Amino acid sequence: MFLFHFLFTSIFLKKRIMKNSLLIFIFFILGILCGIFTLLPVKIIPTSFVTYVVYALIFFVGIGAGANVKVWRAVRRMHFKIVLVPLAVISGTLMGVGLTSFLLSDIALNQALAVGAGFGYYSLSSVIISQMDGDFLGIIALISNLMREIITILLAPVLVRFFGKIAPIAAGGAASMDTTLAVITRASGSEYAVISIFSGMVLTLLVPILVPLFLGK
Amino acid sequence: MSMVFITLFLSAGMLSGFLLRKREKAIYAAEKITTGIILILLFLLGLSLGMNKTVLNNLSRVGIQSALISAGGVSGSVFVSFFVYKYFFKEKNNEK
């Protein structure tokens, strides 16, 4: 019964979140167009205002996580080994991104790590990074974390086939609790849904903490 | 932005979320507000990007470097998860 309930809510969530992703992009593109054609009377958006809005966002992200008691209970049920999943995602992502940064001409190691610490949560990470480092790194964070989500959605079955059932959860990062959850459960099986949501939740909470840490402010 | 404030707001949010967990309407409203704030912030990010000619003129460079970073992140995390799966999760499933 629990499983049924779980699947139902996850399908419902997925539909709503897909709609949200589309909305996010419409707003983002609208913003770019307004910027290019200077449709708005403002020249520069006051940074302090945006900072307060980001703080508000972080507060509300916390509310969502704190209210989800079901997931925190899963830790006790599954013993502590469930914690290994987000730990694998964190260590693996930072290692991979760190190595990649040596190939990149415009991005320093700590900047690449900050982008990687977005763990696929493109909206929150890009906003924090553009606030702390600038538009260039912000847009890199947006595109690369969005790509991470798309890669997961496209490759989930392949990842399971070659790297085991946790692989798509790892690829999904913070998005494994919502946008990529349906694909992951289809590829890895419904018994991995709780693990997926748990890992996504931990990573979601770590995004606002780790990203500023790498940018050193 | 400062780490102290970020941690403060995040923990305050989690505490409020925990206290409000039984009030579904409040949690639903909080989700709606989260989406709303994200929409505003992404609009503003787009806006400052649209006004930033340096970034706009280098979109292909931005795209390539972004792709490399996401490839690195995905392969690294998948690589480590393979061992976690092999040594901690796989056996238990076979017993079932």
Image: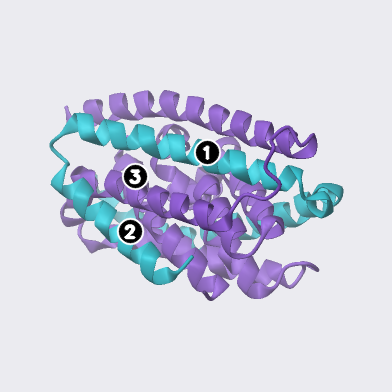
Q: Foreground: B88 or B63?
A: B63
Point out which mark residue B9 bears: 2
Q: Is residue A135 above or below residue A99?
A: above
Local crowd size for mark 3, using a 10 Å CA cut-off: few (<14), some (14–19), many (≥20):
many
Q: Color of chain A here?
A: purple
Q: Which residue type does callout 2 highlight? A: Phe
Point out which mark residue B40 bears: 1
Report whether A48 appears left or right of B61. left
Q: Foreground: A127 or A112?
A: A127
**x and y percentages locating residue B14 in the rendered image:** 25, 53
Q: Which residue type does callout 1 highlight? A: Ile
Secondary structure under tag 2 reads helix
Q: Which residue type does callout 3 highlight? A: Ile
The C terminus of chain B, quarter of image: top left
Report whether B69 appears left or right of A206. right
Point out which mark residue B63 bears: none
Q: Is residue A102 above or below residue A134?
A: below
Please give the chain letter of the residue carrying mark 2: B
Closer to us: mark 2 or mark 3? 2
